Amino acid sequence: MNVRMRRRIAALLLLLALLLPQAVQADSASITCYGEDLTSEQYTLVLDLLEADPATDTLIPVTHEDEVSLLGDIVPAEKIGSRSLSSARVTLAQEGAGIAVTVYNIDWVTPQMYASALSTAGVQDATIVVAAPVSVSGTAALAGILKAYESAAGTELSAAAKAAAGSEMVLTGDLA
């Protein structure tokens, strides 16, 4: 291979290296997990609060069973309730961005509690918005966020890490 060909290949590789991260970021869509027990009016309100776009976001339900499976052994039943209403939108962020959480109508789980629990579970570099149509504890959203993050990142968080995250959230809430 001559020098000219090597330079062309090197230039092409450099160009690809510079453009690829931007292309991946531009294409990254959000995953929106919505409480399965929302009415149609509540669903519309929650999507507005989350600034979710059904045309581009992947929408996945979070069920009461998902919530109970994650938190049923550690969260009192009255905190979990009987319906899944809290919802969340997860958008992967650039490496090193950390976890940023905003909440609407969540009265028990704080943004810091979500961020800490999610970090414990292995979530990295994500922007998360949690919302409900009415004031709720926000426990269903944790199950939904974990489900959405796994889908967005193409990874599976360990069951032990998710259980530790749930326990941490409850302990932090009890201490508060």
Image: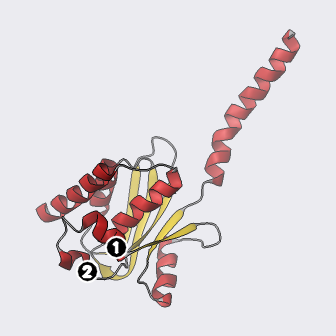
Look at the picture and state if 51 lies above or below 39.
above
Residue nearest the observer in this picture, 72 or 53: 72
| Circle 2/circle 1 CB separation < 8 Å | no
| Image x and y of residue 137, in percent | 27, 75
Report the number of discs. Answer: 2
Q: Secondary structure at mark 1?
A: helix
Q: How is the image coloured?
A: secondary structure
84 vs 19: above or below: below
What type is the residue that disc 1 sits on? Glu
Q: Nearer the viewer, mark 2 or mark 1?
A: 1
Q: Which mark is residue 65?
A: 1
Residue plotted at (43% across, 65% down) = 129
Whole-percent x and y of residue 68?
28, 70
Specify whether 84 is left or right of 91. left
User: Percent from the top left, x then y, of residue 130?
Assistant: 40, 68
> Which image quadrant is residue 86 in?
bottom left
Q: CA distance from mark 2 to mark 1?
A: 11 Å
- For the point 24% across and 52% down, the residue is 164
Neighbour tally class for label 1: few under 14, some 14-19, many 20 plus, Cα within 10 Å: some
- Hey, which quadrant is residue 88 in on the image? bottom left
Front one among 97 and 152: 152
Image position of 61 with respect to 152: above or below: below
Image side of residue 6 versus residue 80, left or right: right
Locate the C terminus and report the quarter of the image it occupies: bottom left
Q: Position of residue 106 (x, y in %)?
A: 31, 74
Instruction: Determine which residue is flagged by label 2.
Output: 81
| Between discs 2 and 1, the one toward the N terminus | 1
| Mark 2: secondary structure | loop
